[in-house]
Amino acid sequence: MNQLNQGIKFCNFQDVRTSLLEKREIAFLDVREEDPHARAHPLFAANFPLSRLEQDAYSKMPRRDVRVVTFDAGDQQDVVLSDAYLAALRLVKLGYSDVSVFSGGLKSWADAGGELFIDVNVPSKSFGELVESKVHTPSLSAEEVKSLIDNKADVVILDVRRFDEYHTMNIPTSTSCPGAELVLRVAELAPNPNTLVIVNCAGRTRSIIGTQSLINAGIPNQVNALRNGTIGWTLAGQALDRGQTRKYSEVSEQTTRAAGVRARDVANRAGVKRASLSDVEVWRQQCERTTYLFDTRAPEEFAAGHIAGFRSTPGGQLVQETEMVAPVRGGRIVLVDSDGVRANMTASWLAQMAWDVYVLDDVPASAFNEKGSWKSLSPAQPGVNNIDPLTLSSSLAARTADDDLQVIDTLVIDLAKHVEYLRGHIPGARYVMRSQFKQALNALPLAKRYVLTCPDGIQATFAYEEIKELLQSRSNAQVDVLSGGTQAWITAGLDLESGPTHLVSEPIDRYKRPYEGTNVPREAMQAYLDWEFGLVEQLGKDGTHHFWVLD
């Protein structure tokens, strides 16, 4: 391991691989945007975009002395100009004391014999394929399920995706029941033990995990996955419904108790550990271990009342997207719910994915006394020049151009995520990604004043100094941040425009999943399924996962 300056060290393939094999804590961070990350990355390189580093670091890496390794494409000849090096510098500034840059990036990993994976949430998707290969999770083809529906068979179809995914498009007659809710609610969704239960998602992973959850819990019904989910349904030439709102309902105390017994048995068989609120208080103070505190209930339940310090992470999505909220591989995960079902079922899967996982027992109802949404931890925001929405609105309304220099009076630069910009932005605002600002600089019109914004103003504040330096390298312009961001503009009753009106950066902050939306090419869907089928072989080649499957 080499050291250059400013406390930044360098490490290589064997350093990272050894940490993973020995189950030592490591945050292996791919600091590229999501789209390039999804094109190729190591299995446990968690996507951690440089553009959001300050906002995400403290919540996702709560221990400041955890080992952190930053990773990028490795396409900069001068390493100090690389995103991985810049990310390391920022992390050191935030107080992280054990930060390394992975030497040579993506090419170096591959040259050393490291396996490269495509797409997102690959650890979870690989694990799902491993489960199916080991226990042969039963499934039915799209044609078989369509025949059951057409013949009005005694069948209940449960869609385990997020409700917004279900609402976009779903299998006809299906009901939304996100993954962690299945064991809790299936007895009332399919009260007749002779009813066939079919579980689906968009592709394979969540339907495999959901189906196997019900089987592991020993429900009396026959359970099958819809093979290849909505993708398989579409490839079979069958129509999907749009805009449906069918959703699970609340269940009785008797149903909850019975489901709790089933879920706890599964968790015990998976080796899930038990903890109390007093344990959590001790772990909050520990320096030697990373501890994640997650509430596995639905977001609306969390908002109505939760334990202080816990983050809302509905259980099905937590299993699907673990590295997005817990990038420190080898850390400790503590789960809680209010029913003894959702936390235990979620924990049973995380344990099989080689996490050190605990479920809180004997939690009094009075502990769920925090209201509202989860608030992320964030470093102190740096000082900036601010402008309020009404002053900005007046400046935009009065703006003129210098006939000789063609200099705009005021130009708004929106650093939002692409999907947020499309949804609504200040009229005339240019969409520029923070991570791509240097490349986009010359495409921006000259202005006397630039105003940075984003939905809440936080990213604009953290990006202020670096962007101000870049903008002022072209002209001696005033650079401000919109106080409260675009939300403050909305609150002030000012108008928005929507759509891709002024895109300066290529929107690479999100990888378009082949199973999203309603107009995905058939070739892309089939290629996605082919890729999923090959993940077990890739896991074997990589060899660092420690996954196992409950039988």
Image (spheres, rainbow, N blue to C red):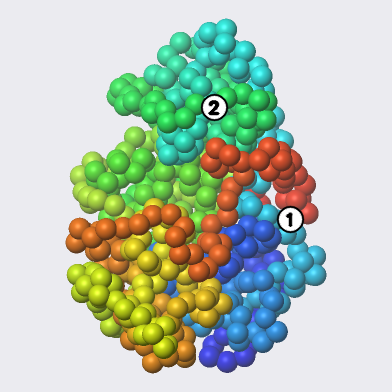
Of labels 1 and 2, the one closer to you: 2
Taking the image as drawn, is residue 51 in sight?
A: no
Residue 255 is situated, as x and y percent measured from the top left of the image, at 36, 22
Residue 324, above or below 19: above
Residue 392 is situated, as x and y percent measured from the top left of the image, at 25, 73
Residue 466 is situated, as x and y percent measured from the top left of the image, at 44, 83
Q: Residue at x 53, y 62 (%)?
A: 507
Quadrant in which the C terminus appears: top right
Q: Callout 2: few (<14), some (14-19), or many (20+) C-alpha neighbours within 10 Å? A: some
* Residue 301 in which image quadrant: top left
Q: Which mark is residue 240?
A: 2
Taking the image as drawn, is residue 359 in sight?
A: yes
* Residue 28 in which image quadrant: bottom right
| Type of amino acid at the residue the image marks with label 2 | Leu
**Which residue is disc 1 drawn over?**
543
Q: Callout 1: few (<14), some (14-19), or many (20+) C-alpha neighbours within 10 Å? A: some
- Is 466 or 126 nearer to us in this picture? 466
| Type of amino acid at the residue the image marks with label 1 | Gly
Quadrant in which the N terminus appears: bottom right
* Residue 487 in which image quadrant: bottom left
Q: Residue at x 52, y 73 (%)?
A: 435
Q: Residue at x 30, y 67 (%)?
A: 485
First in sequence: mark 1 or mark 2?
Answer: 2
Residue 383, above or below 145: below
